[in-house]
Amino acid sequence: MSGKVDLHIHTTVSDGRFSPEEIVRKAAQLGVNTIAICDHDNTDGITPATAAAAAAFPQLTVIPGVEISTYAPGSEVHILGYFIDLNNPELKNALADSRDSRLWRARAMIEKLNELGIDINWQQVKEIAGKSTVGRPHIAQAMLDKGHIKTFNEAFDKYIGQGSPAYVERHKISPAQAVTLVKEVKGLPVLAHPFTVDNPKRLIVELKTAGLAGIEVYYNNYSADKRSELARIAFEHNLIATGGSDYHGIDDSTETMLGNAGVPVECAEKLLALAVRQGLESTNL
């Protein structure tokens, strides 16, 4: 295996800007050889992405994935599932429930923003989302378009990030339940962006007991010190180090570009090797 690796990418199936086919084309053009489509609570982008790669970019490996939103006291926790069984009815039902909760949360956030004097509406946010599932990035873009904020990140820092005045919690399963779900649908569970979690070391130990297979070490713009700390934790607990850009395509001037999170090729090789050992690769890839 060679070339760049990016194991955390979003498409229009959730809250990304580009379709699965467009992501495949962009990845190939940027010299990325292994990607994982990890839309929020949705797997519908995986089949079109793998088909697009097979048709035009056979050198590109597309790993099936999903990012499941969960909640632990004090923080939102995201669990990535790789090599999942896309046709599993239990998974489909769980993800559908989570998507319904996401829409309810978005409407409630808009109402809170209105109460704070920020004039945006559901129709405007839906138009920004287009075919994507409405999420917080679309709300942030609506705020930016109307001039209520000066930068995209300001929306999260001041208004819709956890603990902010317009933040609304969703109905979510626990991190351990998500890890168990991924295991039950024949996937490999990985903790996404650990430093967004309260007390990540303790959570990692708890989730390892539930069947956690890895943690994101090479994530987005994590510093070298943060990556070294996470690499040590992964080694201590015999977890695979993974990583990715968490690319949404909303604003290329502020986001880490596809393939630019500095993920070593060995991360994808170890993830694939574990999938093969557990009999997942031939079934779900």
Image: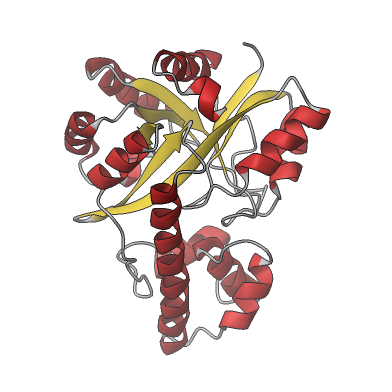
Classify residue 173 as left or right of residue 7.
Answer: left
Q: Position of residue 259 (x, y in %)?
A: 63, 30
Q: Quadrant of the C terminus?
A: top right
Q: Position of residue 252 (x, y in %)?
A: 67, 47
Residue found at x 41% / y 79%: 108
Residue found at x 74% / y 19%: 59
Q: Quadrant of the N terminus?
A: top right
Classify residue 189 as left or right of residue 60.
Answer: left
Classify residue 204 as left or right of residue 85.
Answer: left
Q: Quadrant of residue 54?
A: top right
Q: Quadrant of residue 26?
A: top right
Direction right: furthest residue: 56
Front one among 184 and 240: 184
Classify residue 259 as left or right of residue 171.
Answer: right
**Would residue 225 be visible to someone looking at this image?**
yes
**Would residue 150 be visible to someone looking at this image?**
no
Residue found at x 60% / y 67%: 141
Q: Position of residue 227 (x, y in %)?
A: 39, 26
Residue found at x 61% / y 41%: 46
Front one among 232 and 146: 232
**In the depicted structure, whether residue 50 falls above or below residue 32:** below
